[in-house]
Image (cartoon, rainbow, N blue to C red):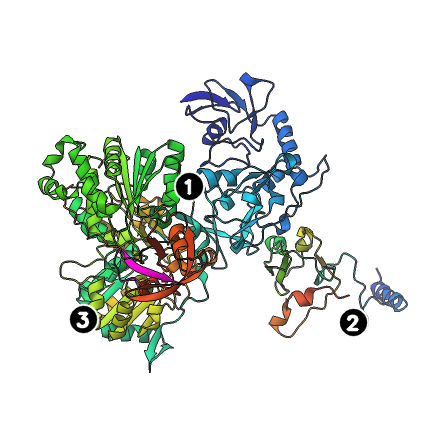
Amino acid sequence: MVNLTIDDKQVTAPKTATIYEAAKMNGVNIPILCHDKKLKPFGACRMCLVEVEQMKGRQIPACTTPVTEGMIIRTSTPDIVKARKMVLELLLLNHPLDCPVCDKAGDCDLQNLTYEYKVDTNRFVDEKFHHEIDYNNPLIERDMNRCVLCGKCARICDEIVSFGALTFIDRGIETKIGCEFEDGLNCEFCGSCISVCPVGSLLARPFKFKARFWSLTKQKSVCGYCGTGCNLTLGVKDNKVLTTLYDENQGFHKGQLCVRGRFGYQFINSDKRLTSPLVRRNGRLIEASWEEALEVVAARLKGGNSVAALGSSRLTNEELTLFKKLMLENVGSSNFDHSAGYAHSALTSGFARSFGTTASPASILDIQKTDLLFVIKTDSYETHPVIGFEINMAVKNRGIKLNIISDKRGKLSKLPGANTFVHKPGSEVSVLNAIAKSILDDKLAVGSVDSVQGYAELAEALKAYTPEAVSALCGLTAEDIKKIAREYASADKALILFPIGQGYVSHNQEMSCAVANLSILTGKLGKEGCGVLCMSEKNNSQGAVDMGFFPRADGMNAQQILDACKNGSVKTLFVAGENPIVSYPDKSKVTTALEAVEFLIVSELFMTETAAMADVVLPACSFAEKDGTFTSTDRRVQYVSPSIRKNSNCKTDFEIFSALISKLGGQTPVSSSLLFSEISSNTDGYAGMTHVSLRKESAFASVNVKPKLIVPKASAAVSSEPGKLAMVTGSALYHSGTLSQFGEGPMHVCPEAYVEMSRKDAANLKIHDKDIVTVSSPTGSLKLNVKVTARIPEGLVFVPYHFSAAPVNAIWDGAPVTMVSLTK
Amino acid sequence: MNPITPIINGLAITLKHLFMKPVTLQYPDERPKVAARFRGLHALNVSHNKAKCVACYLCPTVCPAKCITVEAGEDANHDKFASKYEIDMLRCIFCGYCVEACPVDAIRMTGEFELANYHREDFIYNKERLLEKK
């Protein structure tokens, strides 16, 4: 800490702070346009000029000058104010005075400073700019006439998003922010540039002219898409969510969002939302009253074991607990599951065996504290973009090493120093086992490891996985495998990341055990910056696991439930918030099962394919209309309060389950907060949490690890067939589950499914980018657009799974790798 | 004082007024002359054949009676215009703040004061009714 004086006030600040940061920490506000606390200092705007006693005669930019001991700083002398006024005058010389039609007005740094410094005349005369305005982009409108060249957009796109879509082009007075070759934006559309723009140069087009900033109510919430658990500020007016707002102090990610978080909110107020319960009569779904619908449902739920339930990991912890209660205590069935029955197995079965707990022994915050990141699948960026930003920052700013094993290259492969080892699809477990074997062979394991339970069995089983043997079938060289092992084991701190989800079948219990083995063998567990982070797919996937919403020993899992629907042993199926017809593998199997089941109840936001088959459809509420808690992938429990009032004819799932419990003669909880106190006393790690405490600050549920070495079984290698390509599925960057189809933003940039293939295969098959091809597998065929990219290795095609219009499950039966043929 | 005097004085005043110009306005046969700065019904100013209003929302923001509803739209040239502009005359207090706040001189107050109507919904003036008549 250093001592200094700011405006005659004795203050202290850390040694690494700049004058600007030191002032801000001590409550002195220095005006600035080009600073964001996530970005490196830049010194572009010259608004933050201050006087320093020791550097008399000059005006010093506060944002780039580090503090030194004994500095005497004055932030608003008459000379400084005069200089700042001059800066504003010069900016306003070219900045159009179109505040009445600019959406930034009210939230504009330049406008606020102009008002604060009373710059109402200009001594200079110059022409305004006449740059062409980019109206064509559906998400980001660029008006470079308003730009003040602070460079924040270009810097955030480079430093954090690591895309580099925007940069300064041209020189001198003609300098402007633009894309390569002055082309349109074609980026990830995360909108980070919009969030930091101090003026109205970059604006969110979906929000254009919708409302003024000052008329919005700012509602804090938690994103309802992936498991990262990003915090959101929703801009609400007239009970409608109109936009998301930027708050640099929010969450671990400091307000940083991805495309779906920032632009995917439209589903909340969509006019496609269901607004009335529907009951099937004479083959048609007819509007009915809640009383009627619940009566029918309750009567059908009295079936004991012939009733089954499929939940969604987008429900709150309270709802999932209540749903489970309803099934176990009131219906008397233990047949309930979520996420297709396998997407949670890495936690519920894998980590449960290896770590003795169903949660990841690491947090997102560990990414910045480690020395080596070992990422399994480059898709980690696509499934959890904000965790991807953390990885970007770790690698670019802190020089943390990044090793990736994946079946394809990706965004993360482009980071400086990143090593991507591309293996054959479906051979993850073998590769991980070979790494473990190599660690043992090279004596890289920690000394005490042979006392860990299961060591002998593992060492014995790994004999089959020598790097040389595995290299033959996985496509990596033995040297690669040894290198990964060496680097992982020799790093002081190392963190493993891997995504799970319905699109990642191979990321199952076996793989999570294989991953856990690596961290146990090398002792990279239970320390800061070490461990394994299993990135769960949806906003409450971890919560669903914590609440125990998966089959116990006597219950059926999702796939068994579907089989049982087909053979008639399950007569009533209650689906809450899931759309299995699109998101579960093997569409024909799911469809037959849902057709065969006698009675299908669906609680949904939209008339999905599954809801259309139901006998009763109950209109439910989105995350913005209910209260409850979500548990993010690293077990951060966060409270959400309703941002808007719900439609009076919709009920939250909590209300639906409560009503059904009371109809079945059970005791309903008084409120969700009381139910949560029950949850916190029964759930491992949740002790002491209440809605009241979480409302103030989110809390981490502690994870207690009892390591055990488990022998992971590698699945048989997929034999290649001549003329066929190996298809893998997964998540596209712009989407999450099937919900993002109802968010307009994601659908603007990624409106339909596609098949991504390598240049070489495309050339061999004489297929070009944007062609439409028929992809056929043993289970069916599908017409898809072609994307030819450099990241896909030869012999592989990738098809994302989110889309109802071209569902990949028509050609995918749940195998990690499917052999397909492509024809024009 | 003689008790008759006040009565005489009173009658004198009455008599005087018989020969003066009458104060009473024979409304509606006679129309009042409205002062130039009278604050009556609003009018939306027109320029180049369209309303000058750019839907900046300053008038609904400043309005103390919250009687103005504006919705902005985007026209073919990507410019902002008021796709909806409504004033609820039952709530309006004719303070004139909307005129003062307007940055583009798009709204003014006319001398029109006959705002009585039979139905509540008739007091809601939409953009069509507010546009100045030429």
Q: Nearer the viewer, residue A193 or A216?
A: A193
Q: Residue at x 77, y 65 (%)?
A: B134
How would you rate the neighbour count of disc 1 (Cα within 10 Å): few for under 14, some for 14-19, many for 20 or more? some
How would you rate the neighbour count of disc 2 (Cα within 10 Å): few for under 14, some for 14-19, many for 20 or more? few
Check disc 2 and give the amino acid type. Answer: Tyr
Q: Circle 2 sits on which residue?
A: B27
Q: Earlier in the sequence, mark 3 or mark 1?
A: 1
Q: Circle 1 sits on which residue?
A: A254
Q: CA distance from mark 2 to mark 3?
A: 83 Å
Q: Secondary structure at mark 1?
A: loop
Q: Quadrant of residue A710?
A: top left
For the C terminus of chain A, which image quadrant? Answer: bottom left
Region of the chain picked out in magenta, as a range:
A812-824
Kindly tell me whether residue A252 is visible in this rendering: no
Q: Residue at x 27, y 52 (%)?
A: A543
Outermost bottom residue: A282
Check disc 1 and give the amino acid type. Answer: Lys
Q: Secondary structure at mark 3?
A: helix
The location of residue A224, given as percent across then percent down, is: 37, 54
Tell me: residue A734, above or below residue A27.
Answer: below
Taking B21 as reference, is A189 left or right? left
Question: Pointer 3 indicates a residue of which chain?
Answer: A
Q: Nearer the viewer, residue A23 or A382?
A: A382
Q: Quadrant of residue A364?
A: top left
Tell me: residue B34, above or below residue A597.
Answer: above
Q: CA distance from mark 1 to mark 2?
A: 68 Å
Q: Circle 3 sits on which residue?
A: A306
